[in-house]
Image (tube, rainbow, N blue to C red):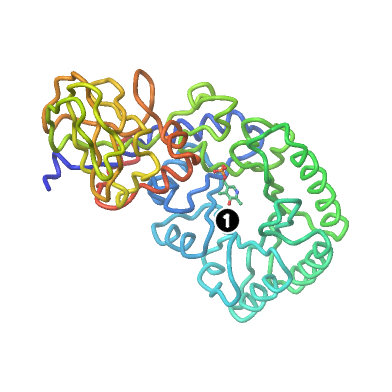
Amino acid sequence: MSQDQPRGEIVIDLDAIRHNVRRLREIAAPAAVLAVVKADGYGHGMVPVARAARAAGAEWIGVAVLEEALALRATGDRGPLLCWLATPGEPYDAAIEAAVDLTASSVWQLAEIAATAERLGARARLQLKVDTGLSRNGAPLEEWPELVTQAVRAQATGVVTVTGVWSHLACADEPDHPSVKVQEAAFVEALAVAEAAGLEPEVRHLANSPATLTRPSSHLDVVRCGLAVYGLTPVPQLSSAAELGLRPAMSVQSRLAAVKRVPPGSGVSYGHSYVTERETTLGLVPLGYADGVPRHVSNRAEVSVAGRRHRIAGRVCMDQFVVDLGDTDARPGDPVELFGAGGGDRPTAQDWAEAAGTISYEIVTGVRGRAIRRWVGADA
Ligand SMILES: *Cc1c(COP(=O)(O)O)cnc(C)c1O
């Protein structure tokens, strides 16, 4: 495949990442921004995204797992970096030595981190996570006082510094959902328990992207933003990315692999779930579900060809799908945009999410396979 004319390309605009981080800093101020770059930067590339986010003033970076934190440190990243998901027996050594902020969601996890720090003769940076109602990770409220007590003890012996206390919201994308207020109140109580026990964490944080954009009361010291950093709306039912002042950073580009004129009544792709109503032009796009084009968008999603939207015709296959181009004058090699920055008559990842019956998070993290990733912008 020619690098100049790739069959499929995932283009990441790092200037858009910078723009979005600046926008989030404006919205969150005086709270700091933690840019979440887990899952390879939501499919955008963890390392270039983290670099662009830091350059735009994200004070913190957040990742889910240890390997992600260490991979980022290996590229020279030295700033505050939080990691939050671990299973029993994880090797914390390298992360403690690299000054990664680890998270303890339970007494056993705290004990493992403290024991590793003690063995290394080091002091682990540690944040405590409380479950205020998501019922996912985080110490349950009943266990919280004990986790706090053990953290105070470990801090007194010099094996950890408690740098933060945090929690995560269940329904921030529905700002009026009653659970949001309940979680905010539970977090205030959990903080009071920590402070009464003598902890003075540098940072307290609760907000994800939707809470950052819709609930200033949740901002506290740091906001943890993932989706909004990538320029997508976490509250599509309320505001588009453009209305929020965000710019989608990822676009997926391809080129027509074949073009043909077909008569009315032509069945298209496996199962003939699409049959042409009139004489029309079909274009073949050489990306399929193995490349992260969800099969669920068959007959539903639209792509942009020559500046206009055209619907996918028939089933998405493993390597390719067909688009009904009507009477468009198209040729093999013509550019196709599956989704991207939007504007004009061009679909976004949010449009694709709606076509697939999912969220834009899953669309952008799902892109993979044979398309080539290319980064553009000042940090590329
Ligand atoms: C993924 C994640 C985030 C970011 O969520 P967005 O909705 O993408 O902003 C924040 N905090 C935690 C704990 C996460 O796992």
Secondary structure under tag 1 reads strand
Which residue: 72% across, 40% down? 220
Q: Is residue 257 left or right of residue 304?
A: left
- When the figure is inspected, residue 249 is found, relative to residue 156, above or below; the finding is above
Q: Is residue 276 left or right of residue 55?
A: left
Residue at the outermost right position = 196
Amino acid type, callout 1: Leu
Of the pair 24 and 230, the residue shown nearer to us: 230
- When the figure is inspected, residue 9 is found, relative to residue 112, above or below; the finding is above
Residue at the outermost bottom position = 119
Of the pair 350 and 158, the residue shown nearer to us: 350
| Quadrant where the image shows the C terminus | top left
Q: Position of residue 165 (x, y in %)?
A: 72, 54
Which residue is denoted by mark 1 in the rendering?
82
Residue at the outermost front position = 265
Which residue: 77% across, 42% down? 184
- When the figure is inspected, residue 241 is found, relative to residue 364, above or below; the finding is above
User: 10 Å neighbourhood of mark 1: few (<14), some, or many (≥20)?
Assistant: many
